[in-house]
Image (spheres, helix red, strand yellow):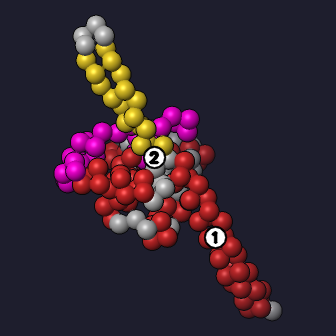
Amino acid sequence: MKLSDNNNAENETSPKHQIREKWGEAVGKGGLTGFLALPETLIRGQDRLGLSSTEMMVLINILMHWWYADKNPFPSNHNIAKRMGINTRTVQRAIATLEEKGLVQRLVQRFHDKENNVHSARRDIDLDGLVSRLNEIAVDLRQFSAPAQMARDERAAQQQL
């Protein structure tokens, strides 16, 4: 799929344009919505984080709702379960396991509408533990890859001689 030819070269190299080129309408109008940025470290570190496939997908569904760095996401377990084709209890167990692993923390904010005498709650999910662990893994990955990169650079330099 190619966008119109009247776009200039600078726009064609923009991340938004590249995302739209890859995914088309799947990312929404103009490539401005409908995609999720994940750190590569999350994918590379799945085993080190001890995440099952279900826990990983629940976590990705939670991350889909994390729009602002200073505001915790608060997705509903029901909606995550519906998107994944699993039951709500499975989502609850996965989040509990993520919490046990120190990757998330569930925060409950209770509300009471006195006028209508209705009680409700919003369940925020704090991701500080995940961010901290991913940063640790990223440092480890850099330390692991630096010697390998140096060896590749050395081999390339020797080949040029």
Label 1 to label 2, Cα distance in Å? 24 Å
Which class describes the residues within 10 Å of circle 1: few (<14), some (14-19), or many (20+)? Answer: few
Q: Is residue 76 magenta?
A: yes
On the image, numbered disc 1 is attached to which residue? Answer: 140
Asked which secondary structure carries label 2, the reply is: strand
Does residue 153 lie above or below 90 as drawn?
A: below
Residue at coordinates 47% horizontally, 65% vertically from top-left?
49
Which class describes the residues within 10 Å of circle 2: few (<14), some (14-19), or many (20+)? Answer: many
Q: 124 or 3, which lies in front?
A: 124
Residue 105: assigned label: 2
Residues in magenta, as a range: 63-89
Q: Who comes first in sequence, dot 1 or dot 2?
A: 2
Instruction: Using residue 152 as the reference point, say whether residue 130 is left or right of it.
Output: left
- Return the x and y of residue 74 as percentages of the image width and height: 39, 37
Residues at discs 1 and 2 in contact (Cβ within 8 Å): no
Q: Amino acid at mark 1?
A: Asp
Q: Please identify the residue farthest to the right as the structure is shown.
A: 161
Residue at coordinates 39% horizontally, 53% vertically from top-left?
59
Q: Is residue 110 visible?
A: yes
- Return the x and y of residue 25 as percentages of the image width and height: 33, 45
Q: Amino acid at mark 2?
A: Gln
Residue 99: assigned label: none
Instruction: Using residue 112 as the reference point, say whether residue 148 is left or right of it.
Output: right
Residue at coordinates 56% horizontally, 59% vertically from top-left?
133
Asked which secondary structure carries label 1, the reply is: helix
- Return the x and y of residue 85 as percentages of the image width and height: 19, 53
